[in-house]
Image: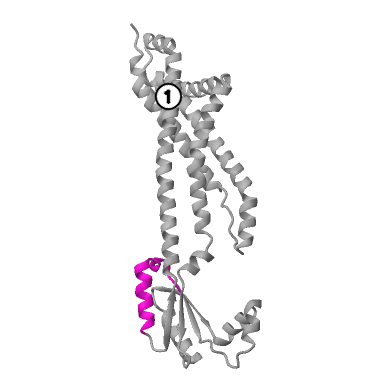
């Protein structure tokens, strides 16, 4: 009984051997194709660097714009103040009524935060201003009213929602007037929308340019290696076997372009950080350029690899079939 089991074991092992050999052959060819493609790029450093630099510039521009948009959105103070509503109460309205209104509106879904500024606090703030301190000294009484500063919830910062909220505030008892700088908010939203759409359009155009550059580079590589391709087909090389080195060429170009794009963005932001910082100090702002973090770097490098592979695949799909043995 032992002998049949031994034969069965040998038979299973022999059945698995071709599969292992096929996988080993497939893996070896991938490794060899990747190594040979990288070596060909090293053998032509100038042309490889120029192609990678073109790809890097095309990827660095939209990346820098997206990071600048993120930096603008993180300013916080300017955007928050643009959407705030200042509710001025009537002079006869006391602090108890102001606190009552603040408590009522703080529970509203449209309001994120409510701050009560008493007339005394407002006067002290104005007295701290050197320009106004001399003029305020002639006042016998404090003419300022109690004020509520409402910060709308993020989901209610559209123009129509803010106008509706301001109208409801005006109808409350004890409210004199409501100030909403809606024009400034609309300008901010319009500028952000224009910048966002321009960045998207530019990104699409530059991505198409990257694919075309890689496709043309791989097409030239196919033409220069026409004889090798013909020999490989004559000895039985499959389409996958023939196109694999060119796909790795596109991937290596993508990796080079991604690294150069990252370097260009870092250098550009380092060069701009000084003037931007000084400009922010003049406006008492904490604005800083958002440099690429780990997530942005991974996304940039991954996108560059995909675009390099896509450009190479397109060139191989279009031009490799034309290279046939006579």
Residue 171 versus residue 95: which sits nearer the camera? 171
| Depicted 104 relative to depicted 189: above or below | below
Q: Is residue 11 left or right of residue 44?
A: left
Crowd tier of the residue under label 1, counting other residues whose Cα lies within 10 Å: few below 14, some 14–19, many 20 or above? some
| Depicted 36 relative to depicted 146: above or below | above
| Label 1: element kind | helix
- Residue at screen point 44% across, 23% down: 218
Residue 164: in magenta span: yes
What secondary structure characterizes most of the magenta part? Answer: helix
Q: Is residue 208 left or right of residue 139?
A: left
Residue 267: image location, x then y, percent = 61, 42
- Residue at screen point 46% across, 39% down: 303
Residue 178 versus residue 168: which sits nearer the camera? 178
In the rendered image, which quarter contains the N terminus? Answer: top left
Residue 324: image location, x then y, percent = 34, 11
Q: Residue furthest top?
A: 326
Q: What segment is highlighted magenta in the picture?
A: 151-171
Residue 173: in magenta span: no
Q: Which residue is mark 1?
A: 216
- Residue at screen point 51% across, 87% down: 145
């Amino acid at each position: 009984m032992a002998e049949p089991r031994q034969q069965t074991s040998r038979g299973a092992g022999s059945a698995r051997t071709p599969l292992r050999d096929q996988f080993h052959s497939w893996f070896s060819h991938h490794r060899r194709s990747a190594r040979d493609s990288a070596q060909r790029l090293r053998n032509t450093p100038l042309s490889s660097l120029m192609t990678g630099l073109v790809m890097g510039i095309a990827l660095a521009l939209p990346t820098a714009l997206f990071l600048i948009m993120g930096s603008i959105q993180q300013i916080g103070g300017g955007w928050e103040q643009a959407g705030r509503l200042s509710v001025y109460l009537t002079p006869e309205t006391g602090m108890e009524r102001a606190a009552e209104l603040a408590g009522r509106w703080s529970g509203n879904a449209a309001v994120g935060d409510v701050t009560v500024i008493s007339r005394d606090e407002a006067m002290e703030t104005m007295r701290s201003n050197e320009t106004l301190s001399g003029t305020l000294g002639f006042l016998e009484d404090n003419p300022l009213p109690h004020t509520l500063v409402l910060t709308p919830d993020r989901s209610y910062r559209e123009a129509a929602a803010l106008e509706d909220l301001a109208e409801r505030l005006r109808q409350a008892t004890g409210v004199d007037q409501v100030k909403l700088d809606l024009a400034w908010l609309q300008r901010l939203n319009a500028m952000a929308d224009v910048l966002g759409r321009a960045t998207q359009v530019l990104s699409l155009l530059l991505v198409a340019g990257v694919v075309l550059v890689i496709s043309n580079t791989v097409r030239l590589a196919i033409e220069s290696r026409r004889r090798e391709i013909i020999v490989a087909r004559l000895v039985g090389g499959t389409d996958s076997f023939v196109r694999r080195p060119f796909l790795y060429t596109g991937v290596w170009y993508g990796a080079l372009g991604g690294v150069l794009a990252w370097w260009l963005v870092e250098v550009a932001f380092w060069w701009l950080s000084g003037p931007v910082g000084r400009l922010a100090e003049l406006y008492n702002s904490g604005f800083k350029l958002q440099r690429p973090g780990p997530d942005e770097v991974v996304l940039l490098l991954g996108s560059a690899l995909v675009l390099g592979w896509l450009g190479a695949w397109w060139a191989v799909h279009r031009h490799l079939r034309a290279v046939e043995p006579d």
